[in-house]
């Protein structure tokens, strides 16, 4: 288990990858109710800015959260996201991974602190798909 105290400023973590499939897009559209044609209509998307269907931004963020390895951290709460920017489309068949960096640490109280992680989502070609800051409230080690 990794606690607030264990993370070092500037520490970098690269995650494993996961391929975005057509099934991911269809299931996300059904779950979220977002059936925008850019994601779900082949003919519409052919004439769009990317020439094909792309993944929903929120789908990409959801997959990213699963890649972070958060189960190994002493998370008290998800604290928020800042400066989310989608700088490139995530296409069907792209394999995304995350490059994470500990950008800031702030004490909250004697039991917890807020860690800000600079997240860069990249595809298999190392092209940047999205960037954002994720904030997590982490427990501190007892007696530290």
Image (cartoon, rainbow, N blue to C red):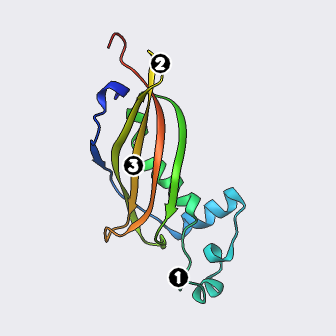
Q: Depth check: 49 or 41 in front?
A: 49
Identify the residue under disc 3.
118
Can you tell which quarter of the image residue 69 is in? top left
Identify the residue under disc 2.
109
Q: Depth check: 35 or 61 in front?
A: 61
Residue occupying the point 37% across, 12% down:
142
Identify the residue under disc 1.
50
Q: Residue furthest bottom?
A: 47
In the rendered image, the vertical position of residue 136 relative to residue 28, given as above or below: above
Which image quadrant: the C terminus?
Answer: top left
**Going from the N terminus, do you reach mark 1 or mark 2 first?**
1
Can you tell which quarter of the image residue 45 is in? bottom right
Residue 134 percent coordinates (x, y)? 47, 45
In the rendered image, the vertical position of residue 75 relative to residue 89, given as above or below: above
Residue occupying the point 52% across, 56% down:
84
Which image quadrant: the N terminus?
Answer: top left
Can you tell which quarter of the image residue 54 is in? bottom right
* Apparent side of residue 11 relative to residue 139 in the rendered image (left or right): left
Residue occupying the point 37% across, 67% down:
123
Q: Where residue 13 is drawn, which disc sits there?
A: none
**Going from the N terminus, do you reach mark 3 or mark 2 first?**
2
Residue 76 percent coordinates (x, y)? 50, 27
């Amino acid at each position: 288990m990794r606690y607030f105290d264990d993370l070092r400023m500037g520490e970098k973590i690269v995650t494993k990858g996961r391929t975005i499939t057509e099934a991911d897009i269809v299931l996300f559209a059904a779950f979220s109710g977002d059936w925008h044609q850019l994601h779900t209509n082949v003919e519409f998307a052919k004439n769009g800015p990317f020439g094909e269907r792309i993944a929903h931004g929120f789908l990409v963020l959801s997959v990213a959260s699963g890649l972070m390895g958060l189960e190994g951290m002493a998370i008290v709460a998800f604290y928020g996201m800042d400066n989310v920017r989608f700088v490139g489309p995530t296409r069907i068949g792209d394999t995304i991974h995350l490059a994470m960096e500990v950008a800031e640490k702030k004490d909250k109280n004697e039991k917890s602190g807020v860690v800000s992680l600079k997240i860069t989502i990249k595809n298999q070609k190392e092209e940047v798909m999205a960037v954002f800051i994720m904030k997590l409230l982490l427990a501190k080690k007892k007696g530290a």
